[in-house]
Image: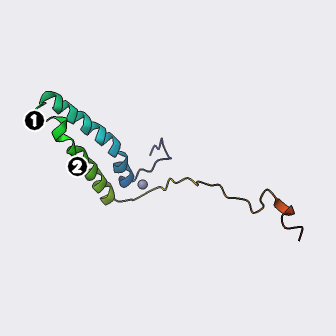
Amino acid sequence: MPDDSNSRCKCPRCTIRSLRGPAVIITLGVLFLLSEMRGDYLSFHHTWPVILVVLGIVSLASSLAPMDGHIETRVDPVPPVPPVGPQGPYAGQGR
Ligand SMILES: [Zn+2]
């Protein structure tokens, strides 16, 4: 099976989680569209909590989704430090 981006996990949980941003953007677009069409009743002032609902649904779905084939994509923040520091072999020689 073709795998064009092997750096990203493709398990259901990570897939749903990655859809959270686009879902919020689409919801914002729909809400502004409704606000433009029906400004008085469906103004953004009244419909903005839908964004919270969408965020909650996506978060719930991602937490319930299985992690089959999950790939941990963490990066090591600090490379392993060698045991000999800058003072190196001369440290502690003057005792
Ligand atoms: Zn994953």
Figure quadrant, ligand 1: bottom left
Residue 55 vs 30, above or below: the answer is below
Q: Which amino acid does label 2 sit on?
A: Val
Horizontal side of 34 relative to 93 (left or right) equals left
First in sequence, mark 1 or 2: give its number. 1
Q: Which of 14 and 25 is in front in this view?
A: 25
Residue 32 vs 94, above or below: the answer is above
Q: Which of 91 and 36 is in front in this view?
A: 91
Horizontal side of 33 relative to 66 (left or right) equals left
Circle 2 residue: 53
Packing grade of label 2 (10 A; few <14, some 14-19, many >=20) is few
**Image point (25%, 44%), residue name:** 51
User: Disc 1 vs disc 2: which is toward the camera?
Assistant: 1
Mark 1: secondary structure? loop
Which residue extends farthest top?
36
Horizontal side of 28 relative to 67 (left or right) equals left
Q: What residue type is labelled 1?
A: Tyr
Q: Which of 95 and 71 is in front in this view?
A: 95
Mark linked to residue 41: 1
**Image point (58%, 54%), residue name:** 77
The location of residue 14, given as percent across then percent down, is 39, 52
Packing grade of label 1 (10 A; few <14, some 14-19, many >=20) is few
The location of residue 69, given as percent across then percent down, is 43, 57
**Image point (21%, 35%), residue name:** 30
Asked if disc 1 and disc 2 are in contact, CB closer than 8 Å, the reply is no
